[in-house]
Image (tube, helix red, strand yellow):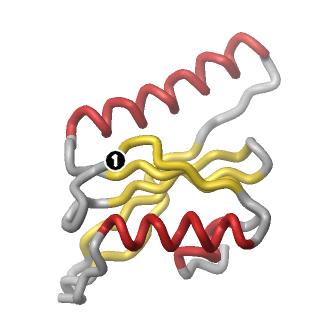
């Protein structure tokens, strides 16, 4: 099992790193200060939103996995519905887990900040 950095320190570090690269970071839901889990909403220029969460692996480690992508549609009405479904998912996860930190990072190639070279 990996030693964990307290959640509030990891969140603060992510936001500072993103802002140092000219991006924007915000806490959408503040979870448990030390042992809370973190869900990231990664965006590039306000578009192409995706959610990353740490998922347990067979070896006991927890790696970042993309759990949801915001779908887009050329149809304006359908596109709005898809955006609302994505937002509803984020809100539901926050209600389900009061210890969960939800952090939005809007920067070019945001996966690089969590060690993924996507």
| Residue at image point 38% right, 72% down | 9
Above or below: residue 55 compared with residue 73: below
Residue 22: x and y in percent read 79, 64
Secondary structure, mark 1, is loop
Asked which quadrant contains residue 81, the reply is: top right
Q: Quadrant of the N terminus?
A: bottom left
Above or below: residue 90 compared with residue 18: above
Q: Say left or right for 109 vs 105.
A: right
Q: Nearer the viewer, residue 91 or 69?
A: 91
Looking at the rendered structure, the number of numbered marks drawn on it comes to 1
| Residue at image point 47% right, 48% down | 27
Above or below: residue 27 compared with residue 23: above
| Residue at image point 31% right, 67% down | 7
Residue 2: x and y in percent read 24, 88
Q: Say left or right for 37 vs 113.
A: left
**Furthest residue in direction top, as rendered:** 77
Residue 19: x and y in percent read 69, 65
Mark 1 lies on residue: 30
| Residue at image point 76% right, 71% down | 21
Asked which quadrant contains residue 61, the reply is: bottom left
Q: Nearer the viewer, residue 36 or 81?
A: 36
Q: Residues within 10 Å of mark 1 (few under 14, many from 20)?
A: some
Q: Say left or right for 13 vs 92.
A: right
Residue 8: x and y in percent read 34, 65
Q: Quadrant of the C terminus?
A: bottom right
């Amino acid at each position: 099992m990996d030693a964990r950095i307290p959640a509030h320190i990891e969140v603060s570090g992510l936001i500072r790193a993103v802002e140092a690269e000219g991006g924007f970071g915000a806490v959408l839901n503040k979870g448990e200060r030390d042992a809370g889990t973190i869900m990231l909403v990664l965006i590039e220029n306000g578009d192409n939103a995706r959610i990353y969460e740490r998922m347990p692996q067979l070896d006991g480690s927890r790696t970042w996995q993309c759990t949801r992508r915001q779908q887009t549609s050329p149809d304006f009405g359908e596109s709005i519905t898809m955006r609302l479904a994505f937002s509803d998912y984020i809100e539901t996860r926050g209600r389900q887990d009061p210890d969960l930190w939800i952090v939005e990072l809007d920067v070019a190639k945001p996966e690089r900040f969590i060690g993924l070279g996507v």
